[in-house]
Image: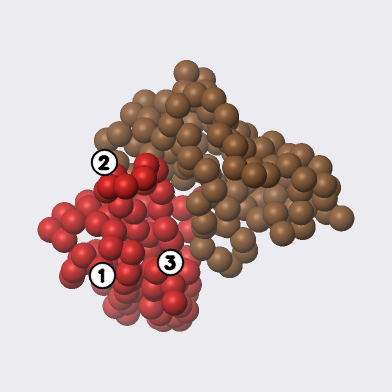
Amino acid sequence: DADVTQTPRNRITKTGKRIMLECSQTKGHDRMYWYRQDPGLGLRLIYYSFDVKDINKGEISDGYSVSRQAQAKFSLSLESAIPNQTALYFCATSTSSNVGQANTGELFFGEGSRLTVL
Amino acid sequence: GQNIDQPTEMTATEGAIVQINCTYQTSGFNGLFWYQQHAGEAPTFLSYNVLDGLEEKGRFSSFLSRSKGYSYLLLKELQMKDSASYLCARKRNYGQNFVFGPGTRLSVLP
């Protein structure tokens, strides 16, 4: 089973609909992120959270909202989807912990959620 | 990608060596990461540099020069399975989050 799980993996919806993408992790990491990926633009940060009560905007947060329901769960919502939100969305986790061996703090990604807004 | 530059595409031959360059904005720097992403899949971590110099991990090595805002990923003994996109990412001091470059799509030809 994947350590970082995203649902749904694929979704087609219409303009104006509300969409929620969910992410859950079993890695025990405190930090969670939502990115979108578009051809030629790379991964761009939407929102990130370093703890259950911590929510921070990324570079492209307009039109999105998030909820950190528990340490293991971080969901992304599009309140009223529009066609230019068609993209591949990735959830990622990292840990701030340095217990044990050196921690590079790298990101661990989910398998992605492909969203198409018609 | 907030001032991270990488070549868009590269092509190399199986068995050869290829170097993928990355330049980045130096302010607020807190580490440079390389990820590999096969088409339709999630990025996976390859390497990390926070100090100047070369880090070697099997066929892959990564180099960093902090003063120049420059890194490269070196792939040796290329295999067909190395055909993928390679993402350069900078970790920022402020916010402790990551900024990604646009990625370099590498095609390995027989």
Q: State the CA–CA distance, disc 3 to disc 2.
A: 22 Å
Identity of the amino acid at label 1?
Answer: Lys
In the rendered structure, the answer to whether residue A94 lies left or right of residue B56 reads: left
Q: Nearer the viewer, residue B108 or B6?
A: B108
Q: Color used for chain B?
A: brown
Q: In which quarter of the image is the N terminus of chain A?
A: bottom left
For label 1, the residue is A73
Residue at mark 2: chain: B
Mark 1 crowdedness (10 Å alpha carbons): few <14, some 14-19, many ≥20: some
The image quadrant that residue A8 belongs to is bottom left
Chain of the residue where label 1 is placed in the rendered structure: A
Which residue is tagged 3?
A110
Q: Mark 2 points at which residue?
A: B95
Q: Do labels 1 and 3 share a chain?
A: yes
Identity of the residue furthest to the front in this view = A100
Tag in front: 1 or 2 = 1
